[in-house]
């Protein structure tokens, strides 16, 4: 593969995996408990990334000033994963994606203002409104009193999703992408 297309391939692969997460969650959610899925996935990830970091000598001890950012990033990733997984088991995939993505956009704007002191411009507000209108056209939303709990979990997962990326920006630049 040409070096020129590695980034595009990585983004496409991540998008495909993310897109199928809801489908896989629906298919295996009640046959294989979440604990086992997470356990196997995390052990596999630690083994693969750990070996890669050892071979490439990319591991650096975490500085004390970065502990809080690693902690906040981990909490956001944990809440996001659990929330969206459980939401997928109780809602349609389109509704879960809509609620999660809409809350993610809101959470991203809020974190941008709080963490990075960004200003909301007219273009930013217009972009947010157009994105929300576009999502309404793309996704069918079906929430009732029996699925309200799952809808709240999808929104909670979406609110915490931007933290995974935003808090990594405050970590000093001394760590490799593999370690992050």
Image (tube, rainbow, N blue to C red):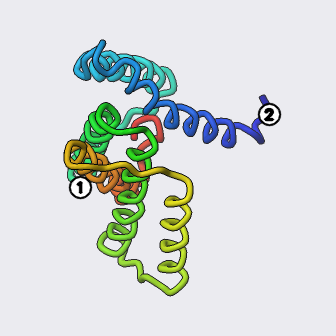
Residue 72, position as x, y percentages in the image: 24, 51
Q: Which mark is residue 65?
A: 1
Q: Name the foreground residue: 125 vs 108.
A: 125
Q: Nearer the viewer, residue 42 or 87?
A: 87
Q: Residue at x 50, y 51 (%)?
A: 139
**What residue is drawn where x is 43% and y is 82%?**
120
Q: Residue at x 47, y 41 (%)?
A: 177
Secondary-structure class at tag 2: loop
Q: Locate residue 160, reporting x and y percent.
A: 29, 52
16 on left or right of 44: right
SS class of the residue under badge 1?
Answer: helix
Percent from the top left, x then y, of residue 45? 39, 23
Q: Which numbered marker is on residue 29?
A: none
Badge 2 crowding class, 10 Å Cα cut-off, few under 14, some 14 to 19, many 20 or more, is: few
Check the image and report above or below for 46 versus 77.
above
Q: Is residue 84 above or below residue 140?
A: above
Quadrant for the N terminus, please. Answer: top right
Q: Tell me if residue 63 can be seen.
A: no
Residue depicted at 26% across the width and 36% down the height = 82
The residue nearer to you, when weighing 175 against 19, is 19
Seen in the image, is 109 located left or right of residue 13? Answer: left
Which residue of the protein is positioned furthest toward the bottom in this rendering?
122
Observer-nearest of 160 and 45? 160
> Which residue is the extreme one toward the top?
31
Which image quadrant for residue 53? top left
Q: Position of residue 158 (x, y in %)?
A: 34, 52
Q: Earlier in the sequence, mark 2 or mark 1?
A: 2
Circle on res. 2: 2
In this rendering, which labeled residue sits more in front, label 2 or label 1? 2
């Amino acid at each position: 593969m040409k070096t020129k297309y590695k980034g595009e391939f990585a983004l496409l692969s991540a998008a495909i995996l993310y897109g199928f997460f809801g489908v896989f969650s629906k298919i295996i959610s009640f046959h294989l408990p979440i604990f086992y899925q997470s356990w196997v996935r995390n052990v596999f990830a630690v083994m693969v990334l750990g070996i890669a970091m050892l071979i490439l000598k990319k591991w650096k001890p975490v500085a004390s000033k970065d502990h809080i950012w690693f902690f906040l990033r981990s909490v956001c990733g944990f809440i996001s994963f659990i929330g969206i997984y459980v939401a997928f088991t109780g809602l349609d995939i389109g509704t879960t994606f809509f609620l999660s993505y809409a809350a993610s956009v809101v959470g991203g704007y809020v974190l941008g203002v709080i963490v990075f002191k960004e200003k909301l411009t007219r273009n930013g507000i217009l972009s947010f409104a157009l994105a929300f209108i576009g999502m309404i056209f793309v996704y069918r939303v079906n929430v009732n009193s029996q699925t309200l709990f799952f809808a709240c979990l999808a929104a909670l997962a979406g609110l915490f999703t931007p933290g995974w990326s935003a808090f990594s920006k405050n970590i000093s630049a001394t760590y490799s992408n593999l370690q992050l």
